[in-house]
Amino acid sequence: MIPGSHKRRFTLLDAVLIAAMIAAVILLARRIRDDLVYQWQWSVIPQYLVRRQASTGRLVAGVLVQGLLMTLRLAFWSAVGALLIGVGVGILRITKSRSARAIGRVYVELMRNTPPLVLVFIFFFFIGNQVTTALGIDSWVRNAPEGTRQTITLLFSPPARFAEFLSATMTLAVYEGAYMAEIIRAGIQSVEKGQTEAAYAVGLTRSDQYRFVILPQAVRTISPALAGQFISTIKDSAIVAVISVQELTFRGLELMSATFRTFEIWITVTVLYFILTGGLSAAARIVERRMRVRGH
């Protein structure tokens, strides 16, 4: 029998916890009903999720769903950048060179001990604008053919907001990369030393040792932590609303200001975040379970 495959029984503690949660929800609902002077209007929410296009009659994504899709794109590209940074810095952290280890440690400590809001402003006002101007990205996006602009909109963001999207992606990649680096470092160090020695004995170069021997084994160990960090990236992406990146939190702020439906909007935004992160957590658990089965 595979370890952990036995059936879990419903215990008295489970019943007590469920009853306590139900009681808390009921008490909260009663307090809101009795003490909060607020006229609920949930009927306004569906149009911000899905709406019918007047010209074609087709159903299209509403404002909140558009923000959710932007959050997904932002988190995906940020996670890709963070993973690349994490692999590079993670390897630096365990090399024999003392200067390389020092560089890796300084980066990790600096990023992990700096508030992400500060990093957002630094990258947006001092680094992101400089990079896009120096590389001519803004002018290239503005003058790109229509097909290219549509592709940019689909994969990244509307061309008019591309500079903000790029700055936000860079910020999140650099910030999350510090955490990725520590996860990858721990995964690499978990590989038995004999594996590295065997790879060296058969004539593999150092880069090939990492590509074919060390990293594939480390991935199995660190995949749950990487999945958790990706989910954390989704939640951390809300901070870039301060530079007008039109992700889910920014869309919620816009709607709250326009409709004054504070509770309905933020409860809906919370549910959308929960569906997204909860779905990814469930998928990560399935992948982890399958990898564990293959490892036995």
Image: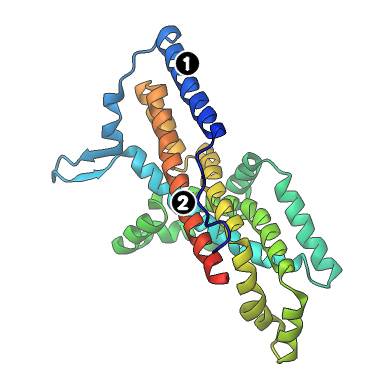
Q: Is residue 89 visible?
A: no
Report the side of 100 relative to 241 (left or right): right
Residue nearer the viewer, 58 or 32? 32
Residue nearer the viewer, 199 or 4? 4
Question: In the image as oriented, which residue stretches furthest toward the right?
Answer: 98
Sequence-first disc among 2 and 1: 1
Q: Is residue 117 visible?
A: yes
Rendering coords of residue 150 (x, y %): 32, 58
Please state the total of marks drawn on the protein image.
2
Q: Dot 1, crowdedness within 10 Å: few (<14), some or many (≥20)?
A: few
> In the figure, 15 relative to 149: above or below?
above
Rendering coords of residue 155 (x, y %): 39, 58
Instruction: Return the residue at label 1.
Output: 27
Q: Secondary structure at mark 1?
A: helix
Q: Quadrant of the C terminus?
A: bottom right
Rendering coords of residue 121 (x, y %): 61, 42
Residue nearer the viewer, 177 or 151? 177
Q: Secondary structure at mark 2?
A: helix
In the image, what residue type sits under mark 1?
A: Leu
Residue nearer the viewer, 31 or 38? 31
Residue drawn at x 81%, y 65% as measured from the top left: 101
Rendering coords of residue 201 (x, y %): 75, 90
Instruction: Return the residue at label 2.
Output: 282
